[in-house]
Image: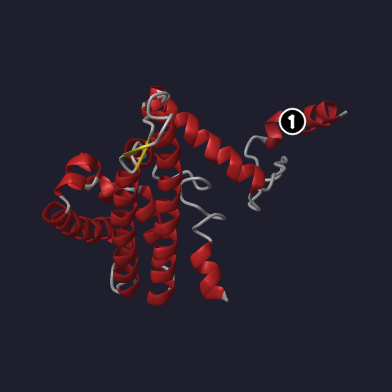
Amino acid sequence: MNQLKNFTKGLIKENPVLVLVLGTCPTLATSTSVINAIGMGAAATVVLLCSNVVISALRKVIPDKVRIPCYIVLIAGFVTMVQMLVKAFAPALDSALGIYLPLIVVNCIILGRAEMFANKNKVFDSAIDGLGMGLGFTLALFLMASIRETFGAGTFAGFPIPVLYENHISILTMAPGGFFVFGLLIACVNKFGKHKPKKKDFGCEGCPSAESCGGSCEEKKEEAAK
């Protein structure tokens, strides 16, 4: 049950794009086409899975002071292998993704999971986490690309859609349309998802300026509440 929960958290509850708001750059850039979105999601998932497994296996070997450079080197190695495979077997996809394929090296989703999860958990758990987060990233890309390509270009996966092909909204395939769809999906997840951020009430305790203000902040807060 814990493994299933670990796997499914990346799909909605802790979706790296729509909840954690990570990997925004490749999300906006490659979500103009369903094919490109799936290709980017699959490439990032493979790199995320492999890097999580290796980093977890070497977590007791890698020195703590140089762990981030080591993570980047490992991730760069997997990205290079994925890029070579894409160039060999899907040159059209490699051309479409362009610079965003090698930029997976600095994707904050991959480095973030390495630092926050793989560095602290066992190999199998890290593999499940990487797979779930990768599929969550792919799902977010697919949803954005489906909306942007369908209504922005009048096609789906390159196939024209009757009526919409002649009456498409071109701005959805541009940067403003990408931000609009991105914000729309985040709003939907916040509205209908179970994930609700907790509100924190910050008081004077622990504040380095508490003595100098004489509690005036607390008084202003009480007045505002009234």
Q: Which residue is mark 1?
A: 217
At 43% from the left and 27% from the top, the residue drawn is 177
At 34% from the left and 65% from the top, the residue drawn is 49
Q: Nearer the viewer, residue 107 or 88?
A: 88
Q: Nearer the viewer, residue 57 or 220?
A: 57
Q: Residue 173 location, x and y as percent?
A: 37, 29
Q: Quadrant of the N terminus?
A: bottom right
At 70% from the left and 35% from the top, the residue drawn is 211
Q: Residue 90 location, x and y as percent?
A: 17, 52
Q: Residue 102 location, x and y as percent?
A: 21, 47
Residue 85 located left or right of residue 41: left
Residue 221 lies in quadrant? top right
Q: Is residue 132 above or below residue 205?
A: below
At 69% from the left and 36% from the top, the residue drawn is 210
Residue 146 located left or right of residue 8: left
Q: Quadrant of the C terminus?
A: top right
Q: Residue 181 location, x and y as percent?
A: 48, 33
* Residue 205 in view (yes/no): yes
Q: Residue furthest right?
A: 226
Disc 1 element: helix
Badge 1: residue crowd in 10 Å (few <14, some 14–19, many ≥20)? few
